[in-house]
Image (cartoon, grey):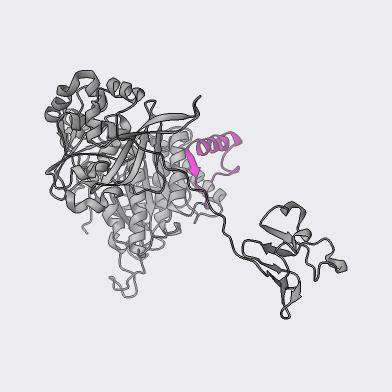
Amino acid sequence: MKQKDSTTWQLDSIDELRPRCKASDKGKKKYRFHCPLCGDEQKHLKRTDGAFDEEKGVGHCFCCGANFFASKWTYQPQRRQMPRQPEISLGDYPSSIMAYLKERGLKPEVMHRLGVGWAELPADTPDGKKTFLAFRFLEHGLVFNVQYKSPDKEFRFEKNCRIAPYNIDAVLGAETVYITEGMMDAAVLVQCGYESVISLPNGCGTRMSCFDPYREHFRGVKIVYAGDTDPKGIEKRLEVARYFADNEFRYVEWAEGKDANDVLMAGGEDLVRCSIEDFSREVPPQGVVTVVDQMEQLNELIMNGVPRFPGINLHGFSHLVRFEPGRLMVISGSPGAGKSSFADYVMMSLAVQQSWKAAVYSPEKYPMSLHYFELGQILMGREMSRKNFPPQAIERALRFLRQNIFHISEECTSIEDIIATATQLVHQKGIRTLLIDPFNYIELPVLTGANDTQKISHVLRQIVDFAHEYKVLVILVAHPKKPQTDGVRKGEPQMPSLYDIAGSADFYNKCDYGLILQRQRSDEYAKGATLTWIHVLKIRFRHLGQIGRRAFGYDSTCGRFVGTRDDNISLREYDRSDWSVRTPEQQQLAFEAPDPDNDLPF
């Protein structure tokens, strides 16, 4: 070993460092070694701080920084032995292939016309080989891929070959193209007189991108899909139909069996041609629903009319809003208007009066035990404490809350987590109501190129989809944007609308019920109680209620709301009964507009 400079040393031989090789690296081309420069120092004894690569002839010590290179060295890369390509014969088929084709009803001359050869490949058999059909993929007469199929349905594929439709040369320039799911089915169609036939290269596992290079050739061409009719085949048919959405597209409903080869074996060539000519169907446009698809539900409405959904036992409110599972209710209003209190009251009223169990996502109500305490107060009509109720009554109320109200942890910050938890509660507990209070605690998703308005719209769509799928009433409390001060009185905020909810107009667009709460000024009707006006600004369908407004009182001793008399000023009697003892009878109010003489105009 000779020193070339302060850090570089030339080895006399490439094997000079091998005696210092790490024991576990013996025989390897790359190994760790005991450095001859620093490795004999006391603190470095038995340490292998160096690394050497014999294929490159260079090494380095990570302790002292010395570099090593071998003299008289020539790089000889390892040669990878390439697998021998099987020899494909295009001559007469062996007896095993002939027997298989006869069983499938296929003529050997048709297979030869398609250029299908045969080959013997290594296999775990007594003689070490197996005979395969060799389907050659050609484009402009040149082979670019080969797939092999044995009579016992073993498939083998050439590696690193381009994937394209089988028999593509036969359809270029054709006016009608027949597509099958497999190469054997393509041969069946050719045998039955259909020449412009191609096959998906990998059956149901085919990626439709393999057709991309031939897009121009398929423009304006009629497509007849002659694939399998089993569940996976039908799914693939829809995928192919979506890909060729610009083309006239039909599919074959086979008379017998699931594919062309089954029909050939069952009824011969005439039955195959009959299936293609007489049982070809148009694929309905994807995403389109007709009245036929809705006849069961429509007949129910025709026979029995629109269902009458329940309200809550709050005088003056039932004719405005009737609650249907599967809907989205948005509640907003100025700060201090009582949005959360009213949302809790509605949820508890539905739980008691309609037995609608509820899930609550309300991270703003911290700690959670205090929120349960407030809900217990609404349930019992007074503060849920030992001074007001005996232990048996408190246990009864706790049992109701335990069986009917389920909080979603504040650790769930994304809408996906909230909906996933609510879905579990639908299946396990049977919830019918989901309260989200407030919306701004939900983290908006990361969507590339989307602004906050688009992200909010995406979240709202997920909420609506959840409500529709699981028939759950979702009550969503959302804060308005910064209030304007050009109201009736100087410095007083103007009542917000549903379009004033912070972030997006989709709070109005996507909801089924839209409510705005407004607390009246303290000196208005000075002799009366402070009132909360509930403005129903949106009702999607007539059977869900009607647009209007009504004044209500708030009983701070129990968190319940109380209706007003016809003057919209005087409060009706407070209800402070214990709902956990009995279920109050729901008031049956006429479903009609209030008397304009008694209800204050907008």
Q: Quadrant of the C terminus?
A: bottom left
> Is residue 540 found left or right of 439 in the rendered image?
left
Q: Position of residue 197 (x, y in %)?
A: 20, 38
Residue 559 seen? no
At horizontal 52% and vertical 52% (from top left) the residue drawn is 410
> Is residue 559 found left or right of 591 in the rendered image?
right
Q: Position of residue 51 (x, y in %)?
A: 70, 63
Q: Examine the rendered structure and indicate whether residue 421 appears above or below residue 484.
A: above
> Is residue 55 found left or right of 483 in the rendered image?
right
Q: Nearer the viewer, residue 489 or 256?
A: 256
Q: Nearer the viewer, residue 15 or 237?
A: 15
At horizontal 48% and vertical 48% (from top left) the residue drawn is 82
Q: Nearer the viewer, residue 520 or 220?
A: 220
At horizontal 16% and vertical 22% (from top left) the residue drawn is 271
Q: Residue 397: say if magenta.
A: yes
At horizontal 32% and vertical 23% (from top left) the residue drawn is 100
Residue 68 seen? yes
Q: Examine the rendered structure and indicate whether residue 265 appears above or below residue 495.
A: above
Q: Position of residue 242 (x, y in %)?
A: 24, 45
Would you identify the image quadrant in which residue 198 lies?
top left
Check the image and name the residue furthest to the bottom.
5
Q: Nearer the viewer, residue 309 or 38?
A: 38
Q: Quadrant of the N terminus?
A: bottom right
Q: Position of residue 315 (x, y in %)?
A: 31, 44
Check the image and name the residue furthest to the top.
266
Q: Residue 543: say if magenta.
A: no
- Give the residues drawn in magenta, as a range: 383-410
Q: Examine the rendered structure and indicate whether residue 204 appears above or below residue 46.
A: above
